[in-house]
Image: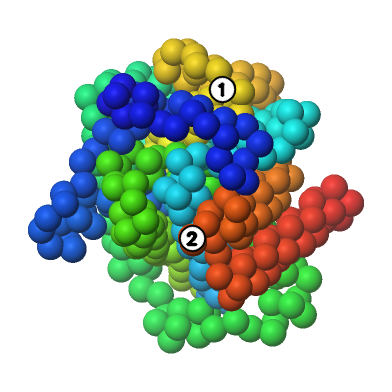
Amino acid sequence: MSENIKKLPLVVEEGWRKKRTQPTLPEVYRSLRIPKTGSWMKKFLAFAGPGYLVAVGYMDPGNWATDIAGGSQFGYTLLSVILLSNLMAILLQALAGKLGIVTGRDLAQACRDHYSKPVAMVLWVLCELAIAATDLAEVIGAAIALNLLFGIPLIYGVMITVLDVLVVLLLQNKSFRYIEMLVVVLILTISACFAIEIFLSKPDVGGILKGFVPSKEIIDNPAMLYIAIGILGATVMPHNLYLHSSIVQTRQYEQSSSGKRQAIKYATWDSTIALFFALFINAAILIVSSATFHKAGMKDVAEIGDAYHLLSPLLGTTLGSILFGVALLASGQNSTLTGTLAGQIVMEGFLNIRLPAWLRRLITRLIAIVPAVVVTALYGESGTAQLLILSQVILSLQLSFAVVPLVQFTSDKKKMGEFANPLWLKVLAWMVAVVIISLNAYLLLQTFFG
């Protein structure tokens, strides 16, 4: 592994201002072998894994509130918005994976090597804020789940979440594959819980199919438009773009043109398939909310705790609430695992600082836990709900500063060579960037000025 790192070319490459440095996550860099012979399925399975780490960011507790609110208020209508946001995420994550594979840089390193030092420092600060906000939502989500399932006070639940640092360190020291396997197991757990929830709630299949077709009503109804923008704005997570561009480099793909092309193909399949799990889970939350709360005339259910307590009486079984709580706990814990990895990638990538893995992850976790503990102690559950909303606002602020560099770099022939985005993809990627920037700007204006 150390030999692989030493073999990196330390020369100024065309299109970049600075020398390439050691990769982020050096302890797992090119640590997983790719078979040179065998079926395409065998090779694809060797690449599969990073996409699932990315997918968990699209189903974290920060998305649950908007999905619940959308379902309870407007039934199945906003399913089309969840589908649209997922398609945008698939495109952006494919670009992030391609950047890492082709250039050998993650997005943080690419920003450092392209922009001036002051600009790179500003981008780093914004990204750290976004990761702290993401971590905050996940910590609160896991703490709420522990409170709902086991009656653990929120403040203790928040502090318990720090233990995930030890889990990540233990698994990563064994093999990066163990982290990927744990994440996949947790995703399957969430999926199974909501598959049962959908069965219990007996939704209207015709209504679901109609909901996936975009409706003009979404634009005409201001309240519906606001929730729709909330779903779109909170779905694409900026730290996922940094994470994906780094962890695709855990594979020992060939550095030739054909080797990189194969790696891009399999990495894109991996992230696309994984993101369809995120689509299913986000859609399932909205479907269950619609089939229970909206159907019963409860159109003001928006908080996770309310949904948990109301599911059992509406479904006629306590299993409904238990499954909801288990899925929430798995979602929160899953997202904290990837959030700590993203924190390490961003610090090492932007600053080229190497901290011990345990220290970097502890710092990341404390940045999220300290405000969560303070707010929980002072204001209780209502305070954590407001903190959850604030975390999504911070994410919206930062997203543009990750999406624009990603599209810019992957469209640059000097940086990407033959792998630069073709014209059709360049146009599509910039359209997605403009849509995301516009919607997040609108969401922020509505949040602050009503």
**Residue 40 in view of the camera:** yes
Tag count: 2
Query: Residue 419: which disc?
Result: 2
Q: Residue furthest left?
A: 38
Going from N to C along the chain, the mark reached first, 2 or 1, is: 1
Residue 144's place in the image compared with 187, above or below, is: above
Viewer-closest of 193 and 7: 7
Badge 2 local density, few (<14 within 10 Å), some, or many (20+)? some
Residue at point 85%, 48% (across, down):
448
Residue 435: x and y in percent read 70, 66
Residue 280: x and y in percent read 40, 64
Residue 191: x and y in percent read 32, 56
Residue 423: x and y in percent read 60, 73
Q: Are marks 2 and 1 in contact (CB under 8 Å)?
A: no
Residue under circle 1?
352
Q: Amino acid at mark 2?
A: Phe
